[in-house]
Image (cartoon, grey):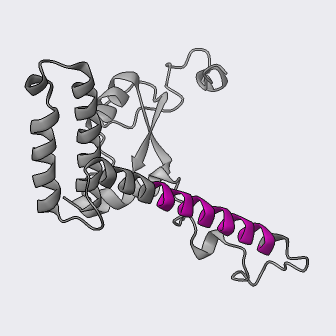
Amino acid sequence: MGKVHYRSQLHIPGEPDVPARPCDMAGCGREGEYRAPRGRNDLRSYYWFCLDHVREYNASWNYYAGMSESEVEAAIRSDTTWQRPSWPLGSWHTSFRGRNPHIEDAFGVYREQADAARAKARQEWQKKQTAAQTEHDKALAVMQLTGEATTAAIKTRYKELVKRHHPDANGGDRASEERLKVINQAYSTLMRSNGA
C-alpha cells in the first residue's frame, strides 16, 4: 500500500505549500511522514517526524531506559511467551484429571488418556532403570568386581587391569587395545554411578 499524501486535499492554488502534518521536532518545517512511538508505556500514540528526524529519534530510542536490571529480565521473559502465562509441563494447568472444575468428563476420556500416559511414562522409566542396572552389572563383571564397589576399590582394580591389558605392555597387540577400551568404558560407567 502506498504512502498517503495529505497535501493534495489541503493545497489551495496560490497559497504557500504547507505540510499536511508538520514534523514534531521543534523548529522543523518539513512534513511529518514517519511515525515513532511516544514512549514504552504508550506504544500506540505517535510522534510524526520527517525522515532525518525519525532517523535521529530511532538512533536514540531505548525501550528499556529507566528500568532496573530485574525489570528488564522480567520484561524479556514475559515477551518470550507473548505476555501470556505459562506453566511447567505436567502441572495442574495441563492435567485434566479432576482438577479443573470447568471440564466435565462424564465418559472418563481425559482420565483414561491421563492414566495411559502415566502408565507409559512409568514403563519407560522402568526400562531406563533396568538398562542402567544392566549396564552397571556388566561394568562390574568387566572390572571383575562384585556388589557395591567403593570408588577406591574401582580405581585400584582399574589400575591393575590397565597395567595388564595396555597395548604397550603387550607388544601393541590389537586385542589388548580393544580389551582396554571395554575396561575404560566400564570404569567410566562405575565412576558415574558412584557419583565420582
Return the x and y of residue 154 as percentages of the image width and height.
17, 56
Residue 40 can be seen, yes or no: no
Q: Nearer the viewer, residue 113 or 5?
A: 113
- The stretch of residues the image draws in magenta is 111-131
Looking at the image, residue 183 sits to the left or right of residue 102; the answer is: left
- In this rendering, the answer to whether 122 lies above or below 40 is below
Q: Residue 159 falls in which quadrant of the image?
A: top left
- Residue at horizontal 9 percent and vertical 23 percent from the top: 168
Return the x and y of residue 67 as percentages of the image width and height.
26, 59
- Residue at horizontal 60 percent and vertical 21 percent from the top: 3
User: How many numbered discs, if any?
Assistant: 0
- In this rendering, the answer to whether 57 lies above or below 123 is above
Magenta stretch: dominant secondary structure: helix
Q: Nearer the viewer, residue 26 or 123?
A: 123
- Residue at horizontal 66 percent and vertical 25 percent from the top: 9
Q: Report if residue 81 lies within the magenta region.
A: no
Q: Residue 111 falls in which quadrant of the image?
A: bottom right
Looking at the image, residue 131 sits to the left or right of residue 72; the answer is: right
Point out the residue furthest to the top here.
14
- In this rendering, the answer to whether 69 lies above or below 61 is below
- Residue at horizontal 18 percent and vertical 65 percent from the top: 150
Q: Nearer the viewer, residue 5 or 165?
A: 165
Return the x and y of residue 10 as percentages of the image width and height.
62, 26
Q: Report if residue 129 lies within the magenta region.
A: yes
